[in-house]
Image (spheres, grey):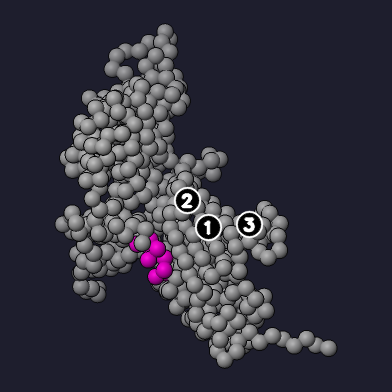
Amino acid sequence: MAEEKIKMIVDGKRMDGRGLEDFRPINVEVGVLKRANGSAIFKFGDTYALSAVFGPKTMHPKHLQDPQKAFLRCRYNMAPFATTERGRPGTSRRSIEISKVINEALSNVIFFEDYPKTAIDVFVEILQANASTRCAGLNAASLALAEAGVSMKNLISSCSAGKIDGQIVLDVAGDEDCEGEVDMAVATIGNEDKIVLLQLDGIITKEEFLTLIDLAKKGCATVYEKQLNALREKYKTGEENVESE
Amino acid sequence: MNNVKSELLVKERQFVVPGETLATGLDFLPSSGCFRETDRIKAKLMGLVKIKDRFLGVVPLAGVYIPRQGDGIIGFIEDMQTTMWIADINSPYDAILTLGEAVGEYVDLAKTDISVYYDIGDVIYAKVLNVSKSKQVQLTMNDHRSRKLIGGRILKITPSKVPRLIGKEGSMIEQIKNQTKCQIIVGQNGIVWIKGEKEGLAAKAILTINAESHIVGLTDRITQLLEKGE
């Protein structure tokens, strides 16, 4: 006897009560770690990503030094307690892949030639996972880089979109990720029309894909606003200072 | 060629983030901390806008120290070779101090160990003589302010906040020096050396400036802190 599939969208509302194009609550905080050059925490609902940036610093081993530009090293890691069941600590196929795509996305915006012979270390730790961890991680990492004073073309904003019960939705969460038909992660350079990360899981038609991309770009623009606000919030008193002086 | 109207979109000392457009059109020029993308000038650092005639720049609020020619810095001697010293200057790049730039007399290397001049672990105030394109940094002691720093204590602050610590024409640092009766030397690389009567108070004031440099009424708070004198 076939088990009846649970409906994930009822009357245009999703399982957690969101509309189709709504985000989970987004929380951003910059400068959370004292000892890193830059740090940030980015939350999509129950997905928490913490990022820390160290450097630019002297590149070791020395034979990997590039006399013309800096070297970017990214490490994505999910805490064993991040998921409902304990995860195996340490590197996995998945974390290597995500580290690589984060590295490639960030490489599009950093001015490496400003820091010859150096290394920039970016750490992304997922403290709690409920889908879209790479997006949250990338958002946190780009904020941490900005806070570290690394020269960049722009921030990177990222969000996920997907197809659930035949409908296109923004910011796929938890069960929707496991049970849904399509899950896609997108990252753009700020709110510009330039994509630096695109990973899609599932089967989709061309028309649906185009709608999905459009929705994801809109989502990235929303994320970008949140990122800007977080940075401005941290240095809020700076602008007031201008007027008083 | 398309004629985009030149327009300045920011105010002096406005807070900007990487990617923020500072001006459109070709009438303005990017200086440090910004770049041109087609007909726009954008910030590449998080910081405060600096406008000087047609030049737009961004003064960073954070970041590591990148050495520049002429900077006065405090360094730590960390290695020695036959005719030169290598110094850690709180930067991704180590600096070289050659014997000729360090000592103003003839040195017979067959008879002298150069550690009599500077030894590993010594702290020096030196000037950046030259920085090559591949960031080879050379220091010099041929400057009236350059010397070995003996005793005292060392503090580290964010290099981009050094101008704030010094204040307008040295007003802030003079105030701390006078009220704490300390000798204070501030390196452009964010290293501060203090020696004197009330080292603790001076350190407290400097660290307060480092933490609160962007918050309104800094000078008043520092005056209060120094007057309380703990």
Q: Which residue is mark 3?
A: A79
- The residue to which callout 2 is attached is A33
State the residue at coordinates (46%, 54%).
A32
Instruction: First in sequence, mark 2 or 3: give its number.
Output: 2
The quadrant of the picture occupied by the N terminus of chain B is bottom left
Q: Secondary structure at mark 1?
A: strand
User: In the rendering, at what x and y percent does residue B191 appear?
Assistant: 35, 35
Q: Residue at x 33, y 23 (%)?
A: B149
Same chain, labels 1 and 2: yes
Where residue B179 sits: x, y (%)? 22, 32
- Which residue is nearer to you in this view: A19 or A125? A19
**Residue kind at label 1, given as amino acid type:** Leu
Which residue is tagged 1? A50
Identify residue type, mark 3. Answer: Ala
Protein chain holding label 1: A
At x 19%, y 56%, the residue is A244
Q: Secondary structure at mark 2?
A: loop
Q: Tell me the magenta residue range.
A: A224-232
Q: Are marks 1 and 2 in contact (CB under 8 Å)?
A: yes
Work out whether residue A17 or residue B69 is closer to the camera in this orientation and state it: A17
Q: Quadrant of residue A125?
A: bottom right
Q: Is residue A40 highlighted in magenta?
A: no
- What chain does mark 2 sit on? A
In percent of the image, x 53 and y 79: which residue is there?
Answer: A170
